[in-house]
Image: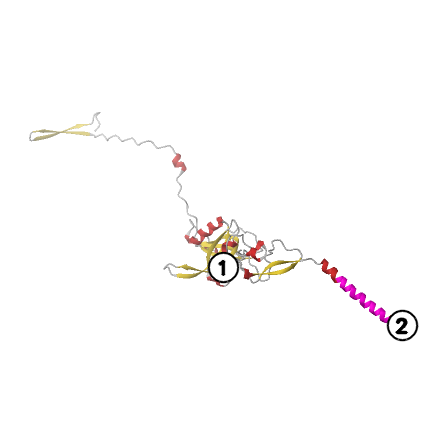
Amino acid sequence: MNRRVLTVVLCALVLSACASYLVYRAVGSRVTAAQSPPSVGLVVAARDLPAGTLIQNADLRTVAWFGTPPAGAILTPDALRNRAVASSIYAGELVTDNRLAPIGSGGGLAATIPPGMRACAVKVNEVVGLAGFVVPGMRVDVLITGLPPGGNALDGPKVRTLLQNIQVLSAGENFQKDREGKPEQAQVVNLLVTPAQAEILSLASNETHIQLVLRNPMDTQVSGLPGMIMSDLFGGARAPEPVPRVRSVIGSLAMPSPAPVPAEPAAHSQYIIEVSNGSVHTQATFSRPGGKP
C-alpha cells in the first residue's frame, strides 16, 4: 500500500475517534443535567440565634437545597419575621418550624416554656452561678436543708432531695434588694417545672436553703432517698422521739365513781346547857343518851 494512502487512513481514524469522544461527552452531560433533581431555596441562620431571640430579616439567609426539603423547613424569610427561637440555632443551620416558638407567643424566656409547664426562679450561691456549672439545657436535682417541723433540735438540720431531673432554662445574674433595701446582685437559675413543682419550690425557697446538684442528662432514673441529718454525719444516735401526751382511754371509759356522801356530824359525848337567870349563870351537864359517855 502506498505510504501516502496509509498516512491519510491513520489521520482519518484519529480524527474520527476524537469526534466520537467529544460527541459522547456532550450527550452524557445533557443526560446528567436532565436527571439531576431541581434545587429549592431554604432559609438558614445567618448568625447564632440563642433561645428567646425574635428573628429579623438580618438574622436569615437563603441557600439552594438539592433534593427533598426536610420536614418543617422554611422557604421564605418573610414567614419567620418576629418569630421567637425556642431552641438555640447556630449559624448556617437550617431553620425548621419545630425549633421556633408558636406564632404570637413573643420573645424572651416565656417563648421557650412548653404548654403546661412553668419557669420557676431559684436563687443559688456564687459557686454554682459564677463557675458556670449550671447552664441552659442541663439537668439538676434540687436539695433542701433545714430543720424539719416537729423535728428534734438536738439532731441538727436535715437535708433531703426535693426534686430530681429538672431542666434548666436559663442562668445568670439578677438584681434584688437586701434587708436594707439596697440593690445587690444575686445568682438566679430558672427551672422548667410543673405547676405543682413550682408551688413546692416557692415554699422551699422561703423556708429552707436550696442547693442544685448537676446530673448526667442521659440519667433519668429517679432515686428514693431518705435524707440525712447532722447527727448521722458524726455517727451518733438520734435523739429519742418525744412521747406524746395521750389521755388514757381506759380512764375515760371507766365507771364513774359514786358521789361522795356527806359525813354525819360527830355525836358529842356530853351535852352542856347554860342557864342565865339575871346576873346568875349556871351550867348543867348531861350524859349522851343510851348511857354512853
Q: Is residue 79 magenta?
A: no
Drawn side of residue 255 relative to residue 167, left or right = left
Mark 2 or 1, closer to the camera: 2
Q: Which residue is mark 2?
A: 6
Whether 267 is drawn above or below 59: the answer is above
Q: Residue furthest bottom?
A: 3
Drawn side of residue 106 relative to residue 4, left or right = left
Drawn side of residue 98 relative to residue 235, left or right = right
Label 2 neighbourhood size at 10 Å, few (<14), some (14-19), many (20+)?
Answer: few
Q: Which residue is mark 1?
A: 171
Splitting the image into 4 quarters, where does residue 249 fall?
top left
Q: Amino acid at mark 1?
A: Ala
Q: Which residues are magenta?
A: 10-28
Quadrant of image for the C terminus: top left
Q: Is residue 228 visible?
A: no
Residue at 76 percent across and 62 percent down: it is 28
Q: Main secondary structure of the magenta part?
A: helix
Q: Residue furthest top?
A: 290
On the image, the x and y values in percent for residue 284 come to 13, 28
- Number of numbered discs on residues: 2
Work out whether mark 2 precedes mark 1 in sequence or the reverse, and give the earlier one.
2
Task: State the separation of the CA atoms marked 2 and 1.
Answer: 88 Å
Q: Residue furthest right?
A: 1
Q: Which mark is residue 10?
A: none
**Which of the pair 229/261 is nearer the observer?**
229
